[in-house]
Amino acid sequence: MDIQFTDEEVAFREEIQQFLRDELPDDWDPLNQGSPHSPEQLPFTKAMADKLADKGWLTLAWPEEYGGQARSIMEQTVYREEMTYWGVPGTDLGTGAIGWVGPVLMISGTEEQKSEHLPPIANAERYWCTLYSEPGSGSDLASLQTSAVRDGDDYIINGQKIWTSSGHIADWGWLAARTDPDAPKHRGISLFMLDMKSQGVTVRPIVNMAGNHEFNEVYFDNVRVPKGNLVGEENRGWYTLAVALDFERSGVGYSASARRTLETLVKYAKETERNGKPLSEDPIVRHKLAERKIEIEVSRWLSYQVAWMQSQDMVPNAEASMSKLFGTELTQKVASTGMDILGMTGQLSKGSKWAPLQGYIQRLSLSSVSSTIAAGTSEIQRDIIARRGLGLPRA
C-alpha cells in the first residue's frame, strides 16, 4: 500500500472544509445534533443533502452516466472523512442509498433498474433503508426467514425485519428474503428493491436506550413486489448481499468521528480542574488520551488501505472486516475513556445543567454498544479475517 494524497486531493479536502464552514450554522456542534432523521432535524438533513447533490458530491465517485463525477476512490474517501468529522447529515439518504445500494446496482442491476433508481439517488430525491436483520437472524443473517413467493409477475413478501435504520423516513427498502426454503440457507436468498409505500408494509419505531429513534421494526403482510425489482439472480442474493456488506464495512467514518470526540475530550481535559490541577496534567488521563490517539490513526490507515485497494480494482474483503472490527471497537474505547475522564457527572443526560459536554459522552457510551453488532458482529468480522484473510479452516 502506498498512501500519499495528491495535490488535487489535498485541495479537494480544503474545498470541502471551506464549503462546510460556509454552509453549516455558526453554532454547529457535530456532537450534539441528535438524530438526523428526527422530526426536528429532518428538514435540515434534506436541505444539506440537496446542497451536496447540487455540487455533485453525494455520488462524486459514480460514473458520469449515473449522475456522478467519476472522481477517484481516494477523493471519495476524503469526502466521507470530512463529512463524518463535521457531523454533516444527509450524506447517505437514509441508510445505504449511496453507500451500497447504488454501487451494487451498478454491478448487478439491470439497465431498467439503474435508470429508475440511480438518478433519484444522485439528485437526493429518494431515501433508502436496508432490510436485512430479523428477530432471529442477525449475525447469522443467512438464517433469515422472511419469505418471497413467486406469484405470476410478482413476489409476495411475508415476514418481519428489525433494527431497520431510517425505515421510518425511507422511500425504498433494500430487502433480503428467502425464495427457496428447501435450499441450503446461503443459496435460497434473493435481493429485492421494495417500495416502502406498498400495501401491507408496516413500520413501527424502536427508541434506543440513548433516547434516539433511528431503528424500526418492519412487517410485511402479503406485500407484492414486481419481479422487475429482483436484483441479480433469484436464489443468488446472498452473494450480491456479501458485496453490499463489503461496501458497508469499508467506511472511514469510525476514525473521523472518534477523532472529533477525542479532540473534544482533550479540550475538556485542558479546561477542567480536579484537585486544583487541570485534568490534562494527570498522567493517567494523558496516557488514556494518547492511547486513543494512536488507535484512531491505526483505524484511519486501515480504512485508507481499503480505499487504496478499491482504487486498484482489488476486492478488500478481509481488509474491510479489519477496518470495521477495529473501528467499531475503537468507538467503544473512546466512549469508555470519555466516561473515565468525566467521572460520575458523565452519566448525566443532556438537559441537566451539570451534564458535561451536554451529555454527549453519556449518549455515545450507550449508542456505541450497538456499533460492534450492526453490519456484522465483531465475532463475525474475526471469523472473516481468519478464514478469508489468513486462510484458517472453519472451526
Image (spheres, rainbow, N blue to C red):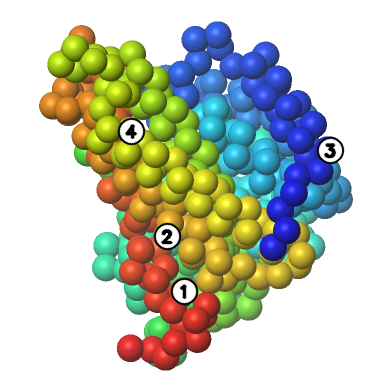
Label 2, label 1: how far apart the Cα atoms are: 10 Å
Quick one: label 2 or label 1, which is nearer the N terminus?
A: 2
- Quadrant of the rendered image containing residue 288: top left
Tag 2 and tag 1, C-beta contact below 8 Å: yes
What residue is pinned by disc 4? 286
The answer to the question of whether label 2 and label 3 lie on touching residues, with beta carbons closer than 8 A, is no
Q: Is residue 183 visible?
A: yes
Q: Residues within 10 Å of mark 2 (few under 14, many from 20)?
A: many
Residue 117 x %, y %: 69, 50
Please state which of residues 123 and 35 is positioned toward the viewer in this rendering: 35
Q: Does dot 4 land on a helix, a strand or a loop?
A: helix
Q: Quadrant of residue 314?
A: bottom right
**Which residue is label 3 attached to?**
8
Q: Which mark is residue 325?
A: 2
Q: Position of residue 77 (x, y in %)?
A: 66, 46
Residue at image x 71%, y 45%?
A: 76
Using the rendered view, name the quadrant where residue 240 is placed: bottom right
Q: Residue at x 55, y 48 (%)?
A: 300
Residue 272 as seen in the image, left or right of residue 65? left
